Amino acid sequence: MQSLALMATNEGGFTPPTISDTHLPEIFPWMAEWGTGFGKNMLMAILSVIIIYLFFMWAIRKRSLVPSRLQWAAEAGYGFVRNTIAKDILGEKHFAKWVPFLFAIFFFVLVNNLFGAIPLLQMPTFSHAGPAYLMAAIVYFTWIGVGVQKYGPRYFKLAVVPAGVPKAVLPLLIPLEIISNFIVRPVTHSLRLMAVMLAGHMIVMLAGSGAEFLIGQQESLLMNATGVLVLIGFIALYFLELLMMVLQAFVFALLTAIYLQGAIEADAH
Amino acid sequence: MEMGERMIRAQLLQAAAEDANPLVPNPWEILASAVGFAALLFVVVKFIAPAFEKAYQDRRQAIEGGLHEAEKAQAEAEAMKAEYEKNLSEARAEASRLREEARAEGAEIVAEHKEKAAAEAARITEQAQQHIAAERASAAHSLQAEVGTLATQLASRIVGEALEDDTRSQRVVDRFLADLDADQSAQAGQTGAAQ
């Protein structure tokens, strides 16, 4: 693809957007030599915190028994994390303590994803690897910490030695369990989110630059009409992307709950 | 073939060098996200989650309290209704008892009055009869005396001699009266037969 694109560039035709285009110029040049400086994504990560805080605190400020529409919506959001993610996965006994953590994870990922669907902001924070690695790392060290706190060093044995398996198979299974639980798990946890968000953002950029190229730079009316078709087709993709944003936030929080549950009830496995 | 492959690889390498690797994180972004998430986790733990949990608990209590109160009110209403019905049936029984009593009393009064009236009537009748008998007796008595005197005077005039002798005159009067009586009763007998 790249070679074709480059060839096309050489001929002076359409230039598709590249990964580099997702890295916008830094706003402040601090530490720019390490990579990109302080940029849009970082502002948006902090903006999301302010939005979540203001929305939920404003919605619940009256704590009325008969909720207003806004309070009802906020309570539905909180209740979703509390009941569907925390209570159903962690169980009645353990869930209450983890509701704030799961709530923060779910809404942090959700709002940052939805930034990708809002004009002007139009950039899912997690389409960059850094925030996705960070979130996965927080979850990774949290569930390992929970397991060690509860079972001590024995936790690692519980986590990698499956119960009820013939001893002969163990030399084969233990390395597999180590790889799957302690190496692959955080990688997939972060990359799943990052890849879906990046792909969604690339689609937006592709549709934008394609429409711009077809409508703005071509003389032929047929080409201009095709550009309009691109935009119409993009509407469907926009809604698909919207679904993906919500779904990825849900999946990320759900997996967090599942990993925590695995650590809390390690001796039951 | 080999040439072509090498060319493509070279181009890919060139592209990779030009293009950013999406797997390489930007430390600034990690730092910004970490600060943001830490702040979010803090406000969620400190403010948001307790506020929502409290609203949830308050509502739960209000609903449970409301249900409890409604149950209490219903029980009270049922007790009141039972009491009211009991009172009503008691009042009905009382009313019918009073009616029955009044009826009995009325009948008694009427009977008493009838009896009294009958007694009074009997008394009046008896009195009247006694009165009549007495009047009649006194009339007969005075008549007897007067008739004697008159007859004597009459007889003395007719006879022309003074009947001075009391004994004789008394005897004459008595005989006359006896005759008169006999006459009268004979006449009465005749009148009764004629009637």
Image (cartoon, coloured by chain):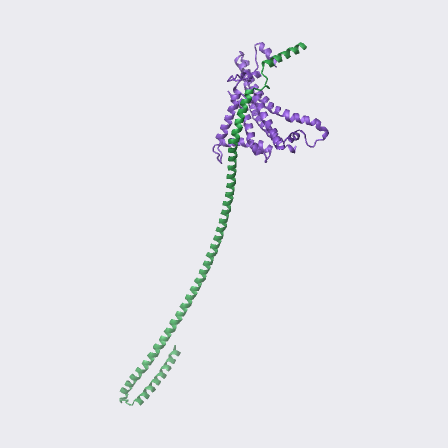
Q: Quadrant of the N terminus of chain A?
A: top right
Q: Which residue appears at 31% of the width and 89% of the height?
A: B167
Image coords of residue A122 (percent x, y)? 53, 21
Image coords of residue A31 (percent x, y)? 53, 17
> Is residue B134 left or right of A179 when viewed as pictured?
left
Q: Colour of chain A?
A: purple
Quarter residue A136 falls in: top right
Q: Which one is nearer the viewer's eye here, B88 or A225?
A: B88
Measured along the vertical axis of the image, is residue A77 above or below residue B7? below
Q: Which residue appears at 71% of the width and 27% of the height?
A: A171
Q: Residue placed farthest to the right in the image?
A: A168
Is residue A231 among the parts visible in the rendering?
Answer: yes
> Is residue A164 left or right of B102 when viewed as pictured?
right
Image coords of residue A119 (percent x, y)? 51, 21
Q: Which residue appears at 33% of the width and 81% of the height?
A: B141
Is residue A3 among the parts visible in the rendering?
Answer: no
Q: Colour of chain B?
A: green
Q: Which one is nearer the viewer's eye here, A203 or A216?
A: A203
Q: Which one is nearer the viewer's eye here, A70 or A260?
A: A260
